Structure formats: structure tokens, C-alpha cells
Amino acid sequence: MKASLIFLAIDLIGTFIFAMSGAAVGIRRHFDIFGIFALAAATGIGGGIIRDLCIGATPPPGLTDPFYMLMILLAVVASICFRKTINRLELPALYLDAIGLGFFAAFGANKTYLLTGNLLLAILMGCVSGVGGGCIRDILSGSTPHIFSREIYATAAIAGACIELLGSTGIISPIYSTWIAIVVCSTMRILALHFRINLPRVRASSS
């Protein structure tokens, strides 16, 4: 399979997983079907659209390629069919988000570097790809975005983007860099959730 097809598959898988996390939040918040779909779509393609607008890759494929909409529809249907399981799980959206984070961080960094050749921008856009959809989901559902208040999140996306760029620049084999990036990023996020690992916080002075 050509590299471009592999990365397309990675982006579509990430879209499906992130869309499921958005749909899961919509179900738990008792949204109607349109609300669930809208939240799933915003989560699934939101970060990618922000990235593509920033790097000039317009119009964003998330808005023009029917495969992305198909992934969102499948995610919504799957989430509704398994809503009882989703409602029983304590943190379904967060763990789905952790897996999607790895896929999007790797894909975003790779796409940005291929289009611009700029390492710093590729790292930033890898992070934006990973956290953007989740931030939009949290804002639309009335929650504080995890990137500002929860366990390691953006840090994991940056780590995944950096590992992916090791392959994109030829330092390590690009055959392995993408999958290593996905595993490392997702594992960092899942471990942070499980063990409640946080970056240091600054507390307001009581005086």
C-alpha cells in the first residue's frame, strides 16, 4: 500500500474514533440525534479543518471528501447502537479520545511537514490536529477543554508529532515512525488518565 493511502487510512480511523468520542459525550449529555451528529462531526474533523486552514490546504478534505462524512455517520450509528455500554462506562469518551489523539497527531505532523517542510509548524499542527476536535467538543458540550485542566494531553500530542517527524525527515524508518508515534502518544494519554498524572498547576494566592 502506498504511503499516501496509509496516511489516508490513519486519518479516517482517527476521524471515526474521535467522532465516537464526540457522540459518546452527546449521548451522556442526552442530546437529540442532530446534536449527537453535530458533536461527533465537530470532534471528528474539527482539528483537521483548523490545521488545513492554517497551512493553506483548502478546501479541507474533511468538508469535501465523502469518506470523512461516512466515518462520522458510522461512528454515530455505532455509538447509538452501543449506547447502553457507553453509558455504563465511566470514561468512554476520554479513552476513545486518547486513541484518536495518537492517530491525528501523527497524521497532522506528517501532512504539515510534507506541505511546508517546516519542523516547528509540523509539530504545532500535529498538536492542533490532535487536540482541536476535543477542544471544540468540550466547548460545545459545556465543559472546560481537557487541554487546559486535565491530565497530560497536548504534551502527548507533541510527543507523537515529534516521533512522526523523525520518520518524515529520514532519521528513522518512516515505516515504523508513524505507528510508534501513535502508540507512544496514545499510551502517554491513557497512562495519564489511569494514574491521574498532571502537569504542575499554578494556584491563586489566598492572600
Image (cartoon, rainbow, N blue to C red):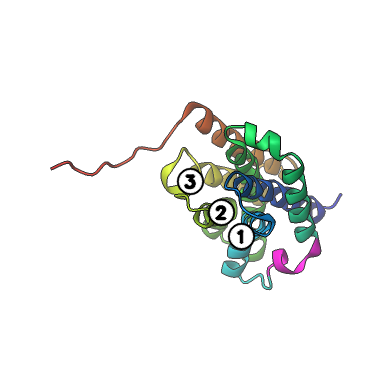
Label 3: element kind: helix
Gap between marks 1 and 3, in whole Å?
15 Å
Magenta-drawn segment: 60-66
Residue 137 marker: 2
The reply to whether the C-beta atoms of the residues labelled 1 and 3 are less than 8 Å apart is no
Q: Main secondary structure of the magenta part?
A: helix
x then y, percent, for residue 124: 52, 56
Amino acid carrying label 1: it is Gly
User: In which quadrant of the rendered image does the C terminus lie?
Assistant: top left
Label 1: element kind: helix
Identify the residue at image location x=49%, y=43%: 155
Direction right: furthest residue? 1
x then y, percent, for residue 183: 65, 36
Q: Read off the residue under disc 1.
A: 46
Identify the residue at image location x=72%, y=66%: 61
Gap between marks 2 and 3, in whole Å?
10 Å
Q: Read off the residue under disc 3.
A: 146
Numbered disc total: 3
Q: Nearer the viewer, residue 105 or 66?
A: 66
Q: Earlier in the sequence, mark 1 or mark 3?
A: 1
Q: Nearer the viewer, mark 2 or mark 1?
A: 2
Identify the residue at image location x=45%, y=40%: 150
x then y, percent, for residue 82: 74, 39
Amino acid carrying label 3: it is His
Q: Is residue 74 left or right of residue 45?
A: right
The residue carrying pointer 1 sits among few (fewer than 14), some (14 to 19) or many (20 or more) residues within 10 Å by Cα, namely: many
Q: Is residue 52 magenta?
A: no
Direction top: furthest residue? 195
Q: Nearer the viewer, residue 93 or 51?
A: 93
